Image: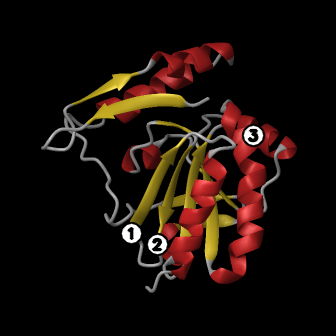
Amino acid sequence: MVTVLIAHKNVSKIKGILLVSSFFSCMLAKARLSRALLLGIALVSSSPAILALETGDKAPALSLPGQSGTVDLANYKGKVVYLDFWASWCVPCKSSFPWMNQMQEKYRDAGLQVIAVNLDAEMADASKFLSSNPASFTIAFDAKGQSAQRFQVKGMPTSLLIDRNGNLVLTHMGFNQGAREKLEASISTALKAQP
């Protein structure tokens, strides 16, 4: 299951953006419609033409409050970063957290840093989620969703793999059992690549 906003690309990158009904149905189920609408509107209406991030592009800047101070993506240059955008109402996020804990532990010494950005409007929602889904990786908070705009998050969860030079290697939306092997293979390949 994944909550989705779909972007249609043409030669000039983006022709239009469609809001998919699963985005609303997940929100209705969790009584978070107003937050979903605000996030969806913020993602869609930030500019008339949004340029799509593509493999090889430099990752946008990210500097957010975290559990242990400011989380600044620039401080992780030289590391491979698995950047995950999540929210407390996201059902697949509950499955992705144990997996991200495993990846952080397994590849920490090889240079992997997992950073998960919470997009909940209320810190209490994020705290409740984290109390039952603990993270052994870095957590950042973006209640206004501005980083989601810069990274063009179209569904929850959305993960981006960033190489040691700060370039985008992979974008992945959703999380399920089948995605684990592909994502881990991408992490392993990025860690072996020369900077």
What residue type is disc 3 on?
Answer: Lys
Left/right placement of residue 116 relative to residue 124 reads left
- Residue at the outermost bottom position: 194
Give the camera-side residue of 178 and 101: 178
Residue drawn at point x = 57 percent, y = 15 percent: 25
Task: Name the residue nearer the viewer: 40 or 3.
Answer: 3
Placement of the C terminus among the 4 image quadrants: bottom left
Inspect the image, locate mark 1, and give the three-letter code of the amino acid beneath it. Asn
Residue 88, visible in the rendered structure: no
- As measured in the structure, the alpha-carbon distance from the residue carrying label 3 to the one carrying label 1 is 27 Å
Q: Is residue 121 visible?
A: yes
Residue hosting label 1 = 167
Q: Tag 3, which secondary structure?
A: helix
Q: Tell me the SS state at disc 1.
A: loop
Residue at (85%, 44%) from the top-left corner? 131
x and y percentages locating residue 186 in the rendered image: 54, 64
Q: Residue at x 25, y 41 (%)?
A: 50
Q: Residue at x 32, y 53 (%)?
A: 53
Q: Which residue is mark 3?
A: 94
Instruction: Please tell me how crowded label 3 is: few (under 14), some (14-19), or many (20+) other residues with Cα within 10 Å.
Output: many
Cβ atoms at labels 3 and 1 below 8 Å apart: no
Q: What number is the disc on residue 163?
A: 2
Q: How many marks are shown on the rendered structure?
A: 3
Is 153 situated above or below 107? above
Task: Check if mark 2's residue and mark 1's residue have beta carbons within 8 Å.
Answer: yes
Q: Quadrant of residue 45?
A: top left
